Image: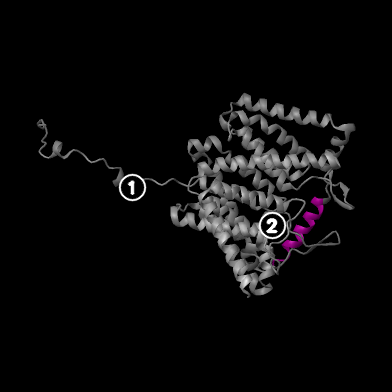
């Protein structure tokens, strides 16, 4: 290695340490950077690798290392209390590490690392970062602001796309720069984030005056025409509207919000130019092509497990997701996170994942009053669970999951001895029943 390369490596290491210190000192900056980088990479244009090689080093990989460093500092400095939800997350991380090591021994580090990178390693590391934050109340406010800011930025990009290419159905394509591309402006992860931001606004996480900002975001979710995002957002809204005293909203006001939402959506569909918007939405709702190849691919992938060990601990990373669906070889992920968990960390990992969500759901009534007023926990949990049935989990969603764990973490109780108020010894030194103590 030449002196120039050593100097560049030392500079990169110093920059990485400085960024880690900034994220540890200001966690909101880490949340914003990681969410923005993930949305940029899962969008239409993918960023180039920072370092070429068998495992291309992406921006999100660097930020994952930064979050891991900040997590270690938080753990050493604040020593967060371990509770069942955090233990379930650590169990998922341990199972993933074991499967990666097994895959590296069989298929090599590049194949195992690339397959585990996004849906497992980045997801679990991001969740661990927000799960160990010392002040979940401040983190909730920061994450809500980041979510709403990202949602409006994505909505603006969607409007620009529609102005250029029009509103297209999920099965449609458009010709841009000589290439056929999906007619929709962006993917399902971005649509889900926009729906979550609308739910946070409706719940009043950023104040009651910000609630009207949710309506344009919900309209964008409808027009983006991702059925997974439709169902997940509808599930979140249903839980939100049925939750008792959700965000301080009375039941009549919640019913009014539901009526207004339905009216806005119906009006938007009725005003579609020449019925184009309505027809594209109907085409998206009736398109069963993607569901058919997913179902046939799921059954083929489940046939890869040969014995009890494969079912319990999963196949090692690097095994791939190749399967035949309709006579076509498909190698992409199965678009079902529950199946993906079963294939790579087995039924044990799937049980740990479901147990984590069950523990968080059960902890919702025990949230402190200030957190309960700002966090629609069960609505967001329901949206994530529905979304995972037809898509993988994404790292930006793990930031929310870790925040849920931090918010349900039991608060430290102070030492009883430190709370003991010393009594005045002069009052009790010679005290006898029925006798006044002289001053």
Chain part drawn in magenta:
290-305
| Residue 113 pos. (x, y %) | 66, 66
Q: Secondary structure at mark 1?
A: loop
Where does the C terminus fall, quadrant-wise? Answer: top left
Q: Is residue 384 left or right of residue 296?
A: left
The crowding category of the residue bearing disc 1, from other C-alpha atoms within 10 Å (few below 14, some 14 to 19, many at least 20), is: few
Q: Earlier in the sequence, mark 1 or mark 2?
A: 2
Q: Is residue 392 magenta?
A: no
The crowding category of the residue bearing disc 2, from other C-alpha atoms within 10 Å (few below 14, some 14 to 19, many at least 20), is: many
Please tell me which residue is depicted at 67% across the width and 33% down the height of the picture.
214
| Residue 76 pos. (x, y %) | 45, 57
State the residue in front, 23 or 435: 23
Query: What secondary structure is the stretch in magenta mostly built from?
Result: helix
| Residue 384 pos. (x, y %) | 65, 46
List the single residue furthest toward the front.
4
Mark 2 highlights which residue? 339
Residue 1 against residue 389 in the figure, above or below:
below
Residue 205 against residue 350 in the figure, above or below:
above
Q: Is residue 299 magenta?
A: yes
Please tell me which residue is depicted at 69% across the width and 63% down the height of the picture.
115
Mark 1 highlights which residue? 415
State the residue in front, 184 or 230: 184
User: Do the residues under discs 1 and 2 have CB atoms within 8 angstroms?
Assistant: no
Q: Is residue 261 visible?
A: yes
Residue 14 against residue 152 in the figure, above or below:
below
């Amino acid at each position: 290695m030449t002196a120039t390369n050593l100097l560049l490596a030392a500079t990169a290491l110093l920059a990485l340490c400085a960024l880690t210190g900034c994220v540890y000192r200001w966690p909101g900056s880490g949340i914003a950077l990681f969410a923005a980088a993930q949305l940029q990479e899962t969008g239409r244009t993918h960023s180039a690798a920072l370092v070429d090689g068998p495992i291309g080093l992406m921006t999100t990989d660097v930020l994952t290392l930064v979050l891991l460093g900040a997590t270690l500092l938080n753990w050493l400095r604040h020593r967060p209390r371990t509770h069942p939800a955090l233990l379930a997350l650590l169990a998922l991380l341990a199972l993933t590490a074991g499967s990666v090591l097994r895959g590296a021994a069989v298929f090599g580090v590049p194949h195992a690392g690339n397959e585990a990178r996004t849906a497992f390693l980045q997801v679990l590391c991001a969740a661990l970062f927000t799960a160990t934050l010392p002040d979940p109340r401040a983190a909730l406010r920061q994450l809500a602001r980041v979510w709403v800011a990202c949602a409006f930025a994505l909505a603006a990009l969607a409007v620009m796309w529609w102005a250029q290419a029009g509103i297209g159905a999920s099965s449609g394509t458009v010709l841009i720069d000589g290439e056929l591309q999906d007619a929709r402006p962006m993917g399902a992860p971005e649509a889900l984030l926009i729906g979550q931001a609308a739910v946070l606004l409706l719940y009043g996480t950023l104040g009651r005056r910000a609630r009207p900002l949710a309506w344009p975001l919900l309209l964008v979710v409808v027009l983006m025409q991702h059925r997974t995002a439709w169902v997940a957002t509808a599930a979140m809204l249903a839980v939100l509207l049925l939750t008792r005293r959700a965000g301080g909203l009375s039941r009549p006001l919640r019913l009014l919000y539901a009526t207004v939402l339905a009216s806005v959506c119906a009006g938007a569909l009725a005003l579609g130019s020449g019925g184009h918007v309505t027809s594209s939405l109907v085409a998206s709702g009736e398109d069963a092509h993607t569901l058919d190849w997913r179902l046939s691919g799921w059954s083929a992938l489940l046939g890869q497990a040969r014995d009890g060990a494969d079912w319990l601990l999963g196949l090692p990373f690097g095994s791939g997701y190749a399967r035949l669906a309709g006579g076509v070889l498909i190698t992409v992920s199965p678009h079902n996170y529950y199946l993906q968990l079963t294939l790579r960390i087995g039924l044990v990992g799937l049980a740990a994942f479901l147990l984590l969500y069950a523990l968080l759901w059960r902890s919702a009534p025990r949230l402190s009053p200030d957190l309960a007023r700002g966090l629609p926990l069960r609505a967001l949990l329901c949206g994530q669970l529905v979304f995972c049935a037809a898509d993988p989990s994404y790292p930006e969603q793990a930031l929310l999951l870790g925040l849920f764990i931090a918010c349900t973490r039991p608060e430290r109780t102070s030492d009883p001895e430190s709370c003991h108020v010393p009594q005045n010894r002069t009052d009790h030194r010679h005290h006898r029943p029925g006798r006044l103590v002289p001053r």
